[in-house]
Every structure is written in structure tokens, then in C-alpha cells.
Image: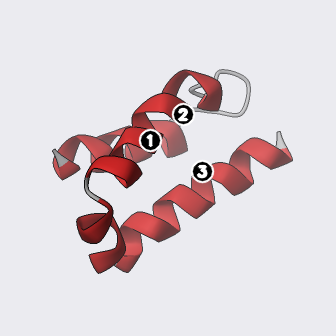
């Protein structure tokens, strides 16, 4: 399950600013990762950092 999260983050980060993967399209999926397995989400700081980074990038666009 978390391998998909990592790939989703990679795709989000590797697309250019013009065709960025819309955060609104993946927000529900990201929410489910946090709600469904929040202990595992919080156990690995890189997962939280990825989430924060996606939010920051979205707000800067």
C-alpha cells in the first residue's frame, strides 16, 4: 500500500508545473492513507514530509 503512496509522490514531483498532477484529484486518496493507517503514516517521517511538500507545491502554483 505504501509503495503506491511513494510512487504517487514521485509522479507528483516529476511532472512540470504546467501539467502537474492536480492535487484535488489525489486529495481523497491521500486522505485515505492518513485516516486508514495513520500509525504507519506517522511512523515514517518521510511520508509526512512528502505530504507537506505536496501541499506546499500546490499552494505555490
- Left or right: 50 with respect to 35? right
Q: Residue at x 56, y 26 (%)?
A: 21
| In the image, residue 45 above or below residue 39 | below
**Badge nearest the viewer, 3 or 2:** 2
In the rendered image, residue 16, in percent from the top left (x then y), is placed at 63, 33
The C terminus, quarter of image = top right
Q: Residue at x 60, y 50 (%)?
A: 54
Q: Which residue is drawn at 48% across and 30% down?
A: 28
| In the image, residue 47 above or below residue 20 | below
Q: Residue 27 carries which label?
A: 2
Asked if the residue at tag 2 contacts the one at tag 1, i.e. Cβ–Cβ closer than 8 Å, the answer is yes
The mark that comes first in sequence, 3 or 2, is 2
In the rendered image, residue 37, in percent from the top left (x then y), is placed at 25, 56
Nearest the eye: 61 or 23:
23
Residue identifier under label 3 = 54
Residue identifier under label 1 = 30
Q: Residue 21 carries which label?
A: none
Spatial distance from mark 1 to mark 2, Cα to Cα? 5 Å
SS type, badge 2: helix
Asked if the residue at tag 1 contacts the one at tag 3, i.e. Cβ–Cβ closer than 8 Å, the answer is yes
**Badge nearest the viewer, 3 or 1:** 1
Amino acid at each position: 500500500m505504501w509503495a503506491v503512496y511513494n510512487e504517487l509522490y514521485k509522479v507528483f514531483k516529476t511532472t512540470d508545473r504546467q501539467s502537474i498532477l492536480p492535487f484535488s484529484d489525489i486529495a481523497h486518496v491521500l486522505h485515505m492513507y492518513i485516516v486508514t493507517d495513520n500509525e504507519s503514516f506517522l511512523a515514517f517521517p518521510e511520508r509526512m514530509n512528502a505530504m507537506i511538500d505536496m501541499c506546499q507545491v500546490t499552494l505555490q502554483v
